[in-house]
C-alpha cells in the first residue's frame, strides 16, 4: 500500500526540497589517513548486515500494543480524557503513539542518510569520506527497516515533526562542511540513540527490541565518527567560530527537546492544541524522558570542545548539565554488547530447534525401520 495512504495526518507535498549550499571537495591523497578513523571505517565494513535476514520479521505485532507501553507512559494517563476512554480507544492511542515515535525515527534516518552523503561530498579528508560512505549505507538500512515496521506491523505513519524538519533544514542549508556532522552526528543521532535506548530497554515486545538493538549497534559507530572528526577540527577554530557552533547546538537542543511531546497525536483524539501541549508538559514520564534523551548529547558536545559559558547555562536551564560527565564510551560499548547478546540468544534457540528436528527425524526413521 502506498505510504501516503497510511499517514494519520496530511504530510504535505510528496517531496521536500532543501537548497544545497557549500562545495564538493575532492582529495588526491589516497594513502594518508588517521589510524583510528580508518579502523572505524574497517569496522563499518565488517559490521554491515541485511535487515531482511538479521531481523525476525515473522514475529507477530499487535498494532494497538506494539511496544508493551505501560499506561503511565501515556500523556493522557490520569486525566479526565483517559477516564472516559474505552479499552479499544486506549489501544488506538497506543497505536498512534508508536506510529508517531517510529515515524520520527524513520524521517530522522532518511535525514541521516542524506547528511552522511553530504559529508562524503563535502569533507576534505579521504578517511572521513571512506567512513561516511559506510554510514550512508547504514542509514539506508535503518530507513528501510523502520519503514517496513510501520507499513507491515503498525499500518500507520505520521508526517515529520516541524521541529525535526527545522533542524534538518538548518543542518543541510549550512555551507560549512562540519555542520552535517554537528547537526546530524551529534544532535539528531545523539538524541535518537537515547530515545532508541529507552524503548529498547523497556519494551516487552521482541520485534521492536531487535530492531532498536541492531540499529543502535550501528549508531554507536556513527557518534564515534562524529566525535573523532569534530574533536580534531574544532581544536583549530577561533573562539568566535566555536561560539557560532555553540549557538547552533543551543538552538538545536531546544528544538529537539520541544519536538518530543507528540502533541499531534493528542490533537488527533480531539484535544485542542493548547490543552494538548499543557497535558504533555505536565506528564512526569515526558519530563523523565526528556532528561534521559540528552544523556548522549551533552557528554559528546563537551568532548568535542564546545563547552562555553552560554552553552553550559543552556544545559543548566534544561536540567541536564550534570550529564556532561557521563561515560559515553561505556554507553556505546553497552549498545554493541546488547546487540551481540540478542544475536547469540537467537542463534542458540535456532540451534536447539535444529537439534530437536534432527533428533525427531532420526527417531521417526528408526521407528519406520522397525516397522
Image: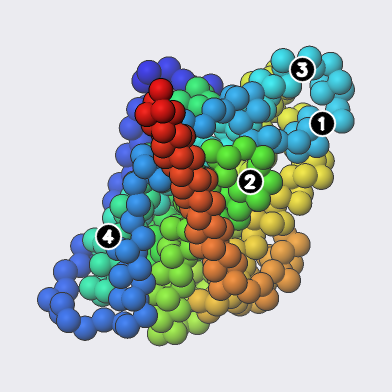
- 77 sits left or right of 365 in the view: right
Relative vertical location of residue 177 with respect to residue 198 in this rendering, above or below: below
Within 10 Å of disc 3 (Cα), the crowding (few <14, some 14-19, many 20+) is few
Question: First in sequence: mark 4 or mark 3?
Answer: 3
Q: What residue is rendered at 72% in x and 56% in y?
A: 291
Question: First in sequence: mark 2 or mark 3?
Answer: 3
Question: First in sequence: mark 1 or mark 4?
Answer: 1
As measured in the structure, the alpha-carbon distance from the residue carrying label 1 to the one carrying label 4 is 44 Å
Residue 133 is marked as 4
Across and down, in percent, residue 9 comes to 52, 22
Across and down, in percent, residue 50 comes to 34, 46
Question: First in sequence: mark 1 or mark 3?
Answer: 1
Q: Nearer the viewer, mark 2 or mark 1?
A: 2
- State the residue position of label 1: 77
Question: Mark 4 and mark 2 in contact (Cβ < 8 Å)?
Answer: no
- State the residue position of label 2: 199
Q: Nearer the viewer, mark 4 or mark 3?
A: 3
- In the picture, which quadrant includes the C terminus? top left
| Secondary-structure class at tag 3 | helix
- State the residue position of label 3: 87
| Secondary-structure class at tag 2 | helix
Question: Mark 3 and mark 4 in contact (Cβ < 8 Å)?
Answer: no
- The answer to whether residue 91 is seen in the rendering is yes
Q: Nearer the viewer, mark 1 or mark 3?
A: 3
Name the image quarter holding residue 252.
bottom right
Q: Nearer the viewer, mark 2 or mark 4?
A: 2
As measured in the structure, the alpha-carbon distance from the residue carrying label 2 to the one carrying label 3 is 23 Å
Amino acid at each position: 500500500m502506498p505510504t501516503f495512504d497510511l499517514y494519520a495526518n496530511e504530510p504535505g507535498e510528496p517531496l521536500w526540497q532543501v537548497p544545497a549550499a557549500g562545495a564538493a571537495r575532492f582529495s588526491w591523497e589516497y594513502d594518508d589517513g588517521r589510524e583510528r578513523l580508518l579502523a572505524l571505517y574497517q569496522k563499518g565494513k565488517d559490521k554491515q548486515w541485511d535487515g531482511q535476514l538479521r531481523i525476525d520479521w515473522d514475529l507477530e505485532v499487535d498494532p494497538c500494543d506494539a511496544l508493551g507501553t505501560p499506561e503511565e507512559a501515556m500523556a493522557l494517563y490520569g486525566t479526565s480524557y483517559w477516564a472516559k476512554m474505552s479499552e479499544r480507544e486506549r489501544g488506538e492511542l497506543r497505536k498512534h503513539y508508536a506510529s508517531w515515535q517510529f515515524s520520527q525515527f524513520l524521517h530522522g534516518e532518511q535525514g541521516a542518510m542524506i547528511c552522511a552523503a553530504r559529508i562524503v561530498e563535502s569533507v576534505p579528508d579521504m578517511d572521513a569520506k571512506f567512513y561516511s560512505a559506510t554510514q550512508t549505507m547504514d542509514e539506508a538500512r535503518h530507513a528501510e527497516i523502520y519503514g517496513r515496521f510501520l507499513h507491515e506491523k503498525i499500518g500507520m505513519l505520521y508526517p515529520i515533526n516541524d521541529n525535526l524538519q527545522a533542524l534538518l533544514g538548518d543542518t543541510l542549508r549550512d555551507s560549512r562542511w562540519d555542520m552535517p556532522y554537528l547537526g546530524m552526528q551529534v544532535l539528531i543521532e545523539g538524541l535518537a540513540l537515547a530515545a532508541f535506548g529507552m524503548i529498547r530497554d523497556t519494551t516487552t515486545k521482541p520485534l521492536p527490541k531487535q530492531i532498536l538493538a541492531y540499529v543502535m549497534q550501528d549508531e554507536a559507530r556513527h557518534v564515534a565518527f562524529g566525535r573523532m572528526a569534530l574533536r580534531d577540527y574544532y581544536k583549530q577554530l577561533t573562539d568566535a567560530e566555536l561560539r557560532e557552533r555553540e549557538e547552533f547546538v543551543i538552538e538545536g537542543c531546544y528544538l529537539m527537546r520541544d519536538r518530543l511531546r507528540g502533541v499531534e497525536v493528542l490533537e488527533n483524539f480531539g484535544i485542542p492544541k493548547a490543552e494538548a501541549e499543557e497535558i504533555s508538559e505536565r506528564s512526569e514520564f515526558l519530563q523523565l524522558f526528556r532528561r534521559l534523551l540528552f544523556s548522549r548529547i551533552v557528554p559528546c558536545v563537551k568532548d568535542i570542545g564546545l563547552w562555553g559559558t552560554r552553552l553550559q547555562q543552556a544545559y543548566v536551564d534544561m536540567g541536564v548539565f550534570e550529564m556532561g560527565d557521563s561515560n559515553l564510551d561505556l554507553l556505546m560499548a553497552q549498545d554493541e554488547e546488547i546487540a551481540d547478546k540478542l544475536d547469540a540468544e537467537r542463534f542458540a534457540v535456532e540451534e536447539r530447534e535444529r537439534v530437536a528436528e534432527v533428533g525427531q527425524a532420526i527417531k521417526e526413521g528408526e521407528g519406520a525401520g522397525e516397522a
